[in-house]
Image (tube, grey):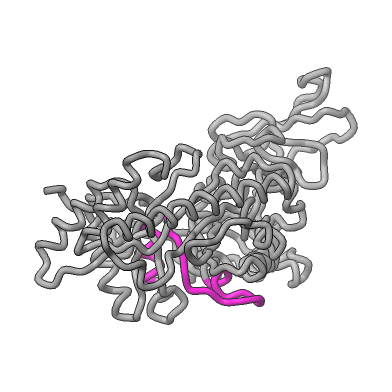
Amino acid sequence: MTVQTKTPIDFLALPSKDILVKEFVGKSLDGLRTPAFIIDRGIFAENCAKMHKKAEAWGAGFRAHLKTHKTAEGTRLQLASSANTTHNVVVSTLMEAWNVVNAGLVKDGTVKDMLYGLPVDTSKVDDLSTLWDIMAESGGVIRILVDHPDQVTFLEEFESRRSTPRKWSAFVKIDGGQKRAGVSTSTPYFEALLKKMFASPNVSVYGFYGHAGNAYASTSLDEASSFLSGEVGAVNTAAAAAKSILKSLGKEGPDVPFKLSVGSTPTAHAASAETKAALSTLLHGELELHAGNYPMLDLQQQHTSLVGGPQIAQRVRATVVSYYPERGQNGTDEAIVDAGAIAFSKDTGPSGGFGDVIGTSWRVGRVSQEHGILTRNDKEEILKLGQVLDIVGQHACLISAAYPWYYIVDSSVENGSKIVDVWVPWKGW
């Protein structure tokens, strides 16, 4: 029997939002200790509304991934925008799942459907089961990802020890060629998995889930649309095969249509009535769009050409601590800031570097743990010691993970110059 583990949520003390709000709200950004992570709430909310409109135009439901910001405040903006409302989320950790519950987001009806976004870990089933019990009290449901027959076996063993066994609602995670998580429909393992799930008294197939992580390489709407079509094709092929397997087993089709869940931020930005119309195949289920990075955005997303700089809601504020004339390539200057690999992560992107200084040609060209080296290609702009800079990094999901709290501004409030809130992100796994 697999030893069950518990999410250590009671052992992790997060900073007090009340104390932070009392200390910082109403103050200017200019007095912040750096490095500091800043989010423009107005842009964040606008990005959420745009994504709801994309899903609606595509004729799909929407499931918001919480992995980038990991906050109650951001979750509310993702789910209830000025354009639409949804109640479905994906979490990447059980710490996120527990904090969604403890923040009251399930009890007040904000979140009704929560998917744990990794193939189900057999050591965490008891924890997921407890979450399911709590969500059920408010009419909510936990869903899981399955991509291996042994996961089904363990779920059956787990439920056999309960006085009233239940049936887990599962997406089958599909590998569309990205070789991340998932099972490929082109292998015999897929059919074996489906037959085991359809025969199981404790697992039901809710739908098929794909994620085109390779879509981050897109540099145009056409490329992102092609990746989106590929995602849909992969999960639709899986759903068609599932219907065929059900028929071969002498079973009826699904009671409700399979859910075909696809998306990454680039492919979600490509969703539209036009791309929906371009789908030439008959759909064997109902479409659902999912994405996570889109409220914040970053240089990686900007490089896809699907978003522009004004749509990026997050930035890191750093201070120039020293300056080195003519030290750089071709005699250009370099500078050092008090934000390095921890503050920006070591993720880079097609545009190069680790971050771009807003409004200048300077960029974070190299990083050490706690400092970054600014480089540039021209010899025009000179920085001064003590100068404060706003820098957009490559990958918002990893950058935000480093910060114990986020300073929130709003572009509609005094042009975003004053702190209007502080968000405390959920930490741990």
Residue 109 quadrant: bottom left
In the rendered image, residue 83, in percent from the top left (x then y), is placed at 66, 76
Q: Residue at x 57, y 42 (%)?
A: 343
In the displayed structure, 11 sits above or below 340; it is: below
Find out whether residue 96 is within the magenta segment: yes
Asked if residue 176 lies in the magenta stretch, the reply is no
Side (left or right) of 27 relative to 161: right
Give the image location of residue 347, x and y in percent: 58, 37
Q: Is residue 139 left or right of residue 5?
A: right
What residue lies at 68% left-to-right and 57% top-to-bottom?
278
Up the image or down, 354 lies above or below 27; here it is: above
Q: Is residue 117 left or right of residue 214?
A: left
Q: Nearer the viewer, residue 138 or 328?
A: 138
Q: Nearer the viewer, residue 112 or 410?
A: 112
The image position of residue 364, as x and y in percent, is 69, 35
Q: Which residue is at 20% across, 56% downward? A: 155
Q: Residue placed farthest to the top in the image?
A: 330
Which of the two residues, 235 or 191, is positioned nearer the viewer here? 191
Q: Position of residue 162 (x, y in %)?
A: 12, 67
Q: Can you see residue 423?
A: yes
Q: Which residues are magenta?
A: 76-102
In which quarter of the view is residue 213 placed? Answer: top right
Kindly tell me whether residue 336 is visible in this rendering: no
**In the image, is residue 281 above or below residue 131?**
above
Question: Which residue occupies 24% across, 57% down?
Answer: 125
